[in-house]
Image (tube, rainbow, N blue to C red):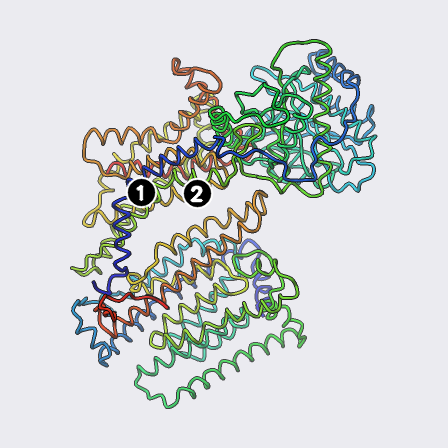
Amino acid sequence: MMINIYHYLIQLFTNKHIIYVFILIDCLNSILVYKISYKIIQFNCIMENFNKTNGKYARLFESKEKKDDFLLTEKNFKPIFWSLFAMVCYLFNPLNLACCMSQTTVLIQHFVLLMWLNFLLNGKIFMSYIFLAIHANIAVYSLVLIVPSISFIRQKKIFKRKQIKSEFNLISKHATVFVLLFACVFMFNLYLENFNTRFIDCTYLFILKVRDLVPNMGLFWYFLTEMFDHFITFFIYVFQLNAFLYSIPLTLRLKNEPLVNLLIQIGLLYVFKSYPNIGETGLFTSFLPCVAYLFPLMRNVLVFTCMLIAGMVLAPIMFYLWLGSGGGNANFYFAITLVYSVGQIFLLVDVFYACLKREFIKLNGSNVPLNTDGKPANFTLE
Amino acid sequence: MSLYKSDSDNKTKLFENVIKFGPVLSILGYLSGIVYFSLLPHESLIHGTYISENALLPGLVTSDIYSTDSIFNYYHFLKDAYENNGGKGYNAELIHDIFANKLKIESYTQNFNLSNPFSNSETDGIKSGTNAYAFGRAQRADGTESIVISAPIYLSGKKKKIPNLFGISQLFILADLAKTRPYWAKDLIFVATDMEHVGIQAWINSYFEAHSDSIKGENLRARGGSIQAALNLEFSDINTNKLEIKLEGPNGKLPNLDLFNTIIRICKSMQFECSLESEKSANSDFSYYHNRPPVDHVSGLINTVNMMLKQATGVPSSLNGYFLNYRIEALTISGTRTSFSSKRSQQKQNVLKTTRIVESTLRSVNNLLERFHQSFFFYLLPSSHYYISIGMYMPAFGLIFLPVLIKILSLWFEIFSNKKSTHSDRNESGLLMLDLLKCVVIKFMISFLFGIVLYLGTPFFLMFGKKFQLSPKDALMNCYLAMMANILMTPFIFRSKFSSSGNKTEAENINKLIILLFLTIFVGTISILNFSLSFFVAIFYSPIALLAIQNVQNRLAKFFKLAMMVVACPIVYFSFIYLLNQYFFENKNFFTNPGQFYVSLSEKFYNFVLFSQISQIWTYEMINLFLVPIWSALWITAFN
């Protein structure tokens, strides 16, 4: 389906003008980023306010060291400023600029994803599911994003003080709606291909089976080049399992912070997918200002900043050394790709850590609890 | 302590230790880096060269060249053609004629044009030349691989052009061998190039169908498959008793060390003197032919620095460099004469040995089954028998750059570790943003604007010069110095705009951090591509950057700081290196004659810029685009 759209677009605009389409889509994306960030911050503020009035944060106010503005309110964490900052991050991120200049179709995928987020946060669930179904048909990995969506919807229902009779009913209702929509888009694709099922192999199974091992910024290609053919199927299963597996446990743990959960999951699926793209990292990092209140609580900011910068700067050079100048080999490039991916993972884990720590402080107050032997306890991530 | 802070007690201790011991560690690291680098050519740390690719088997075959008669015949024929008629008869057409009619192998000529990259009009004219190339197809091979032997028609000597008569004669001899012997597994391609660096680039670009703005050559009419290696022969005189080998390619590329080791071993087995071109103190004691010569530490260090100086400019030391762009291992063999004994028999011996050495190298390369990949691509050579690999010299570089890294860490800790939780820091963040905008962003924008003007500005500088009727080199030098003066004036002009209000130290710290990060990224990335360039930049800018960032109160110290910053201007620093290079290695004393130094410097500068534009060398562009902005940002910071 996307190929048909692209074909139509290319025919509509000549080669010279197609760049304007990409710039337009980039600008639309940035506006969507602004609106989404605004909504995210607003929702977080409402959530904390709600919990405060419910008396969940009683221990926080009893603690010795008080920070008056620790909880989010609209006054001390201005939505306008931080969502503008997120928009600026999106527009001026070098990764996104590179994507726009090279006119990749990732921008259109971002557009679909951002439309999903927009409709989800505004409450129009059906529309959001349509866009998620479209995105899941383009990139299979976004299927897992249904789980944080359901978590967010559940949290919103709690705010509206609607009683949830049965969580299982809620989950199954939404899941079936999504699966039906996904099947609809799939049927539409099938219809466009005149019911010839060959395209399944070319699109979905291509992403899942990783048959083309062109060197990219991901982790798959190097492992699979080094492996005997015998074991490839097994390792592909393990790698793909890794990509899909983190969704449900993360959602269960971050039940009370659905939006941070959402952002982490978007980031995670972009690290572990089979053909990642630097623009996707750009999209994820441009949402980081939404959770800027977590930055003071993060532990390893220097580490992952340096890793990401080093990875981004050295990756093209190592690529050139391997395939251009001939002075290096594939190991150089893969090492830098690893550094880049590990930097991203550190970033995600740090965001997660900061979120958990904040939750701990909110629920238990800011005193450092004492260990069994009387020394102050260390807060670690097990 | 509370949980609001992100770090635990252990971490704060680490921060404090870094801030406390930082300066001591920096100085220690820097000095130990320099000491470690100087100790590298010492015999305890050095490694002897060895042949990694077993297929090469250097010197194992018996030579097929028995008599020098044909060599002398060709040599005298070419010499007659050169001396009669003012040298007009000695050109590529003659060589093509010999290949086609006398040796009867496939031979063609290629015409090419060189246009001045900085002028659009035809005032400077378009120079043209002709190459001649011939193919000695292997009798029993399938023609998929080949070896290139190239010889320039004229060598660019110090005063005037010298014809490369002996080099071209060797081409003919080898062509004869290629035609008649059955043991060649690869085709031999013989290229006689015109206009030194331009001709060989025209040929290589046409071979790989690459595009160049200033050099346009005809399409080649035949090819030899995938080129495995290339040799370049430059002989100014037929009486050679020493071979010098030139390695450096453009932008700091080097050929595979195996090719170099092969030639050294073959020379050793034939008992012919051979060394690197950068080896100033050659060992003329021939008793080492069964072993390596002993390691001489001081001369090893001098040779290493000489090689690094040549590699740092990014200009290839000879024509072989352009093959390295396409990963074809290539060397230049140039012959010189160390003693002037011209006994007839001695001369014949030398000629025979030289030709046999070239032939033996080709036979070794002929044995290869795959491309050169075993030995090192990144190395430094203190002598022809010892090497320093990248694993040995990179730690020295890291230690030299340690002060900057420690400073970055301590700046980071200072910025992000003291949280003043007394007043609300939401207002503060807005003020901080404004401060940042004033302090950081404007400075960087201005600095990078200077860099971009210098990067794009060379055609405009020359145009201005033409309007004032200056010669091109004066124009370029004057305009460049004018830009530098502009940068030097910037803090005085913008003094009011750069001062920040309110939260001064935090924005200042962020500014310093970003400058140091830029310097680190620049030096780090260039160190992989052209190690010598980044070494010379790091060894000087590492202390200079820290000096510029330091806030000094004492007037004398402040004056000293500003004086050092002026010296740190890229052009001043590099001319200083040029001065030292000329003094130590070429024995030209410029200290007594500054006027002559300026003239020679501007001429060299103009030639360098022109050459970089024609041959696509990025040294000048990178320094303009990154080092000049970093220096100007440091200069502006040094004033506050």
Say if mark 2 contacts mark 1, CB within 8 Å: no
Asked whether residue A335 appears in the rendered view, the answer is yes
Q: Is residue A54 left or right of residue B139?
A: left
Specify the label residue B473 is tagged with: none
Mark 2, Cα crowd under 10 Å, few <14 / some 14-19 / many 20+, is many
Residue B607 in view, yes or no: no
On the same chain, marks 2 and 1? The answer is yes
How far separated are the C-alphas under marks 2 and 1? Answer: 23 Å
Query: In which quadrant of the rendered view does residue B266 lie?
Result: top right
Compared to residue B215, the image places residue B524 above or below, namely: below
Q: Which quadrant of the rendered structure holds the N terminus of chain B?
A: bottom left
Q: Which residue is mark 2?
A: B524
Q: Which residue is mark 1?
A: B443
* Front residue (pair B222, B230): B230
- Residue B414, given in percent of the width and then of the height, sits at 25, 50
Which of the two labelled residues, at mark 2 and mark 1, occupies the earlier sequence position? 1
Q: Secondary structure at mark 2?
A: helix
- Residue A59 in the image, given as x and y percentages of width and height: 20, 75
The spot of residue B18 in percent (x, y) is: 28, 47
Residue A64 placement, left or right of B51:
left
Q: Is residue B81 left or right of residue B36?
A: right
Task: Give the residue at x 63% y 64%.
Answer: A211
Q: Secondary structure at mark 1?
A: helix
Disc 2 marks a residue whose amino acid type is Gly
